[in-house]
Image: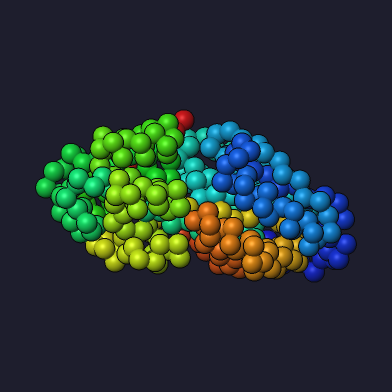
Amino acid sequence: MVASAPVHAQDVSPYPSRPIRVLVGFQPGGGSDLLARLIGPKLGERLGQSVVIDNRSGAGGTIAMEITAKSQPDGYTLMVASGSQITNASLFTKVNYDLLKAFAPVSQFTSEPYLWLVRPSLPVNTVSELIALAKSKPGALTCGSSGTGSSAHLGIELFNSLAGVRLTHVPYKGTGPALTELIGGQIDFMFAAIVPVQPHIKSGRLRAIAVSSSKRAITAPEIPTVAESGLPGFEYVGWYGVLAPTGTPRAIIDRLHAELVQILQIPDMRERLLADGAEPIGNTPAAFEAYLKAELERWTRVIKESGTKID
């Protein structure tokens, strides 16, 4: 199972006595980075120490994961991790850490549902109709993503596996080009974040048939889930959470968790997250640990079945 910080009777009362480093596995401006820069100042205020954001981009976020795994487990190195960094543990052929042993989960901070979008000229309004059409035309329907191995690509492969269909994956160099092609009718479907595509839905240039989370999205409650619309058991969301190196004292993990939960309760923080399409979570270290294990098991199976690999 994902390693929890061991319980020891340690005196951590001076913590923190110096600045805390928060690693981000991507360049400035991305999702993990934006979230880290939202959390950092507020966490620093609550702990009475500065929080320094350290961007270590490369290899799909695995470089930052490796640095975090090898850091001293003293509470002064943390990382904002994304769902894609967890799937990369199975996706990349060479990863120099054991995900199930290297990290102490602190808390899942957010969850981000996606919309299943179709071009308006396609004769489907529900997931059930999509499955029926896909079964009648194996491999003929196309689904875009931001690239091979991206979370959206794996969401497509999960759908193929659970529905027993074969949508043809079309990788693009980013979400923007895929969305442009969908609006232009060059592809049939794609998953996309809720907030940026709302204008296209309102204008009729795209149609949303389902939301990818297990529950309806706070920001789009009128849209049914994939499970409600025809495929029980389907769930695919983006998420961010905070990890520490395994062996970090339990008292420090608990302190950090308590502070993160309090930060999520700040009204302007909650409003900012929801405005970006992210739903606040703030679960316990144990709950986040169980979630990480389930995510790893699920995506490892999907990746193996699909044969997707990145060297």
Taking depth in this image into account, of 17 and 211 the one nearest to the observer is 211
Q: Residue at x 24, y 47 (%)?
A: 120
Residue 246 in view of the camera? no
Count of marks placed on residues: 0
Q: Position of residue 191 (x, y in %)?
A: 36, 48
Outermost residue toward the left in this view: 136
Q: Position of residue 29 (x, y in %)?
A: 60, 40
User: In the picture provided, is 136 more to the left or to the right than 268?
Assistant: left
Instruction: Reply above or below: 190 against 220.
Output: above
Q: Position of residue 183 (x, y in %)?
A: 31, 40
Taking depth in this image into account, of 96 and 123 the one nearest to the observer is 123
Is the N terminus in the top left, top right, bottom left or bottom right quadrant? bottom right
Instruction: Reply above or below: 121 against 213.
Output: above
Taking depth in this image into account, of 129 and 81 the one nearest to the observer is 129
User: In the picture provided, is 156 more to the left or to the right than 95?
Assistant: left
User: In the picture provided, is 112 more to the left or to the right than 270?
Assistant: left
Residue 281 in view of the camera? yes
Q: Residue at x 56, y 46 (%)?
A: 31
Q: Residue at x 67, y 38 (%)?
A: 55
Q: Position of residue 272 (x, y in %)?
A: 59, 58
Outermost residue toward the front in this view: 203
